[in-house]
Amino acid sequence: MSAEKRSNLNILTALHSEAKPLIDRFKLVRAPVTGVQFYRSEQSEMQINLVVTGLGRVAMATGVGWLAARTSGHAAWLNIGTAGHASHPLATAIRVAYCAGEQEQRGHHVPLVADWPGMVGRLQTGDHVCTDYPQDALADMEGSAFFSSAIRFAPAELVQSVKIVSDNVETGVEQLDGTKITEYIAKNADQLSEFAMSLVHLADRLPSYAAQKEAVSSLFSQLRLTHSQSMKLQDLALKQLNCGGNLEALGREVASAENVHSLLKSWQRALSENPPLLRDHFD
């Protein structure tokens, strides 16, 4: 695949101490951009971009938008950072499969399509450093903003996060510093690098997101739909395509459906039988 067609990789971290092992691993160089910690590497087959956003949801959302405006082409998005967990050992790498914000009613279910051999779990995002760990979940300050921002620019399968446990009930956040954060990320550098490349390979196999959305929208051009129905059908159709579905087959189902409600139920049932979210991989 040529460099022009190869998918890019966009990485976001909150802290430079989280980014340092990745900068070293991918041989990234800081770009001369004022006010932003932006690192990149032009490789023979792809480009890797990394932004250190700063702490918190606003900073993360701003960083995602800034990077999206300055990169072009098909890209995979990856948030790598540290998070607390009540019981998991320090330096444990956990891929996020569900993320919820402290004030949000809607969580982000993350499709687990790209290969990941390690643990998978839930993430709770709050606005303050967590000292009272949620039950059976990681805790951070940026995750929900990353997901809600990045999914505007790529299919959900290509918007992923891996958190490294940095504190727990035995070793609290007050004992954490930049050196330890870098150490914990570095311990998982091989696994993180392999996962990042698996995301890029997945992005290479997926059709252009814009073209895919346009093709899906055309399926419903003859139907009278509310905005909510249209969004639900498009979401279900995109998920089926990324789980191996066929656009022509989906079109035939639309044409033969008795009504919108029966179509919605049929596609929801199909996804439940072939889900993009591998629930049995939860820790």
Image: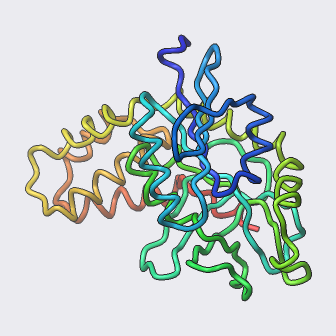
Residue 234 rendering spot, x and y as whole percentages: 29, 51
Q: Is residue 189 above or below residue 228?
A: above
Q: Residue at x 69, y 81 (%)?
A: 130
Taking the image as shown, residue 208 lies to the left or right of residue 192, namely: left
Horizontal side, residue 169 vs residue 68: left or right: right
Q: Position of residue 66 (x, y in %)?
A: 44, 45
Q: What sort of colour scheme is used for the picture?
A: rainbow
Q: Residue furthest front?
A: 34
Decide which of 267, 206 is in the foreground and name it: 206
Residue 117: x and y in percent read: 79, 48
Is residue 98 at least partly visible in the picture? Answer: yes
Q: Nearer the viewer, residue 195 or 188?
A: 188
Residue 41: image x %, image y %?
Answer: 64, 26
Question: Looking at the picture, does residue 196 appear above or below residue 259?
Answer: above
Left or right: 119 in relation to 187: left
In the picture shown, does residue 173 fall above or below 211? below
The residue shown at (30%, 33%) is 248
Residue 216 left/right relative to 12: left
Residue in the foreground of this view, choosing between 107 and 169: 169
Question: Looking at the image, which residue is at 42% across and 61% down?
Answer: 269
Quadrant (top left/top right/bottom left/bottom right) for the C terminus: bottom right
